[in-house]
Image: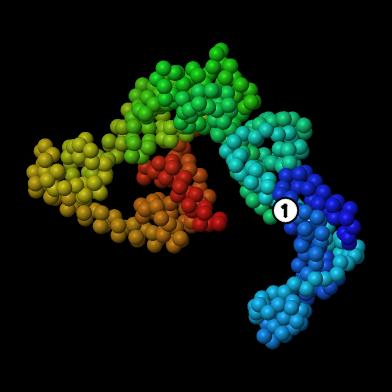
Amino acid sequence: MLNQRSDKVELLRIAEAVAIEKSIDKEIILTSMESAIQKAAKTRFGAENDIRVIIDRESGDISLYKVLKIVESPENLDTEISLKDAIKKEEKKDIKVGDEIFEQLPPVDFGRIAAQTARQVITQSVRAAERERQYNDFIGKKEEILSGIVKRLEYGNVIIDLNRAEAIIRKEELIPREILKTGDRIKAYCYDVVRENKGQQIFLSRAHPKFMEKLFFQEVPEIYEGIIEIKSSARDPGSRAKICVNSKDSSIDPVGACVGMRGSRVQSVVNELQGEKIDIVHWSEDPATLAVSALAPAEIQKVIIDDQERRIEVILTEENLSKAIGRRGQNVRLASKIMNYEIDIFTEKEETEKRQLDFKDKTDTFIKNLEVDETLGQLLVAIGFSSIKEIHEAKLEDISKIEGLDSGTAKELKERAAEYLIKEKENMSKKLNELGLEDALINFKGVTPGMLVTLGEKKIKTLKDFAELSTDELIGGYDEKQGKRFKIDGYLEEFALTKKEAEDLIMNARNLIFN
C-alpha cells in the first residue's frame, strides 16, 4: 500500500510520466488508478461492498470509503443503512432517505493478486485512452497524404509505422509491381479511419485517384492557392492516369502550370507513382470539347452527345481507332471516368452501318407490328419515332401534322399501337410464366417485363444469376485482342441501358443476395 510520503509523490510522478509518454490526459491516468485500487479493495473488503477510492491530485493521498445508501428499511447491510443509524454515524440532522454516506476504511496493504489486478486495470485504461487519442489524431487527417516507414509485410499487405500508430496498405491499394522493403519511407493517401474494439484502424492507399490529386496539390502552388481547380481524375495504377484541371484565372494555363518548367512538377508526381504516365486534360464545360481533349492523342472527327443518358458517341478514322481505345481499352476507360459519360467509339464506316441498321430495324418493327407499308414505316422513323410506345403516347394532332397523313390515318396508327401494346403485355406475362423466373427477379426494381423475358431466354432465371453478371455481359461493349477490336454482345443491349444504370442494377441485386 502507498502509505509513505515518498510513495504518494512517486504515484503522481508516475501518472504524469505515463500521461506525457502516451500523450493522454493525466486525469485519465489518475482515474484509472482509482478504478484499479477500487477493484483491488473489493477483493480485500468483499465484492458486495460499494467502495469508492479518491486520490488527492495535489498530495497523492489515497482515501478509501464504503458507500452506504440511506433507506427506510435496510435489506442489505453491506450497501444500505437506516436513517436513524446514519444520523448517529454522521452526527448530522439534515440528511434524509435517498442520500449516501461515506464510511472511511482503513488503509491496507494489498496482496500480490490484488496488486496484479490493479496493474491490469490501469494498463487497460491507459491503452483505451491511447487508442481514443490516436483515433482523434488521425480522423482529422482523413483524405490527406501521410508519410511513414514500412514496418513489416503481412500476406501482401504493408504495415506502416506512422510514429505512435500503425496503418495498413492492403494489397489491392498498392501500385502493381511496386516493391517495398522494411525500412522504406513512403507516402500514401489516408482514405479511411475506423474505430474498432482493439483500436483504430488506419487505411492507406497508393492506388487511389485522390493520392495523385493530393500529390499535385503539394507540387503545384496554383492548386494549393485555389487558382487551379482539379475537376476529376482517374487512374490505372502503375500504368496510366488522367487528371482534369481548370484555371479560375484566364491568364494562367492550367495544363502548363501542372506540367511545370521542363516538366519538373508532373515528373515529381510521376516518380512517386512509380513511373505512371499522366495525361493532364484541360477541362471544358462543353462535353464535346472535353471529349476531344480527354481522348488525346486520337484525332476525333465527330462527337454526338446524349446528355439525358450521359452517353457520348465518338466518330473517328480507322487509323485513330487504336489511339482512342488505348491498350486494353485503357484510354477510353479513363476518359469516360473523368467525364462521367459513357463513351462509345466508332469508325466512320461503323457509324454509317450502325445508323443504317438502326433505321432498318425501327422501320421493320413498324411495318410488322403496325401493318404499315415500307414508305410510311420509313417516314415514322425519319421524323423521330423510335418505338411503338412513342406513337401510342403522341398526341393525335401531332401525328396528323405529318406530311402525307390525314387525321383518319393518324387515329388508326394510334389504335394499332394501343392494340399492339396490350397484346405485347399479355404475351410477356405468358412468356414469364413459361420461363419459370424467380419471383425475386420478377419483382426486382428497375427490370422491365421485356428485360425479364430476354433474361429468361438467356437462362438468367434467379436474382442470384443476375447478381453474378458483369456490366459487359449485361449491356455489351468492345475489347481489343491481338491488335483486333471486337464487340461483346450484352444480354440487355437492345434496351439501351447506360453503364451506370447497369452497374446500379447489378450492385443492388448483389446487396440483396449477399448482404
- Kindly identify the residue that appears in the image at 61 percent across and 44 percent down: 139
Can residue 90 be spotted in the picture? yes
The colour scheme used here is rainbow
Describe residue 445's horizontal placement relative to residue 194 as left or right. Answer: left
Can residue 315 be spotted in the picture? no
Between 119 and 156, the one lying in front of the other is 119
Between 102 and 303, the one lying in front of the other is 102
Q: Position of residue 242 (x, y in %)?
A: 51, 27
Q: Quadrant of the N terminus?
A: bottom right
Describe residue 219's horizontal placement relative to residue 232 as left or right. Answer: right
Q: Position of residue 281 (x, y in %)?
A: 46, 24
Would you call the spot at circle 1 few (<14 residues within 10 Å), some (14-19), or many (20 or more)?
Answer: few
Q: Identity of the amino acid at label 1? A: Glu
Figure check: 290 above or below 392: above
Q: Position of residue 239 (x, y in %)?
A: 59, 27
- Kindly identify the residue that appears in the image at 30 percent across and 57 percent down: 425
Figure check: 364 above or below 238: below
- Which residue is identified by label 1? 27
Describe residue 149's horizontal placement relative to residue 442 as left or right. Answer: right
Q: Give the mark count.
A: 1
Q: Quadrant of the C terminus?
A: bottom right
Work out which residue is located at the far bottom of the displayed protein and give it: 73
- Location of residue 73 (image quadrant): bottom right
Figure check: 162 above or below 31: above
Work out which residue is located at the far top of the displayed protein and give it: 262
Instruction: Give SS at disc 1.
Output: helix
Between 318 and 299, the one lying in front of the other is 299
Q: Position of residue 298 (x, y in %)?
A: 44, 21
- Kindly identify the residue that appears in the image at 76 percent across and 62 percent down: 54
- Kindly identify the residue that appears in the image at 69 percent across and 55 percent down: 197
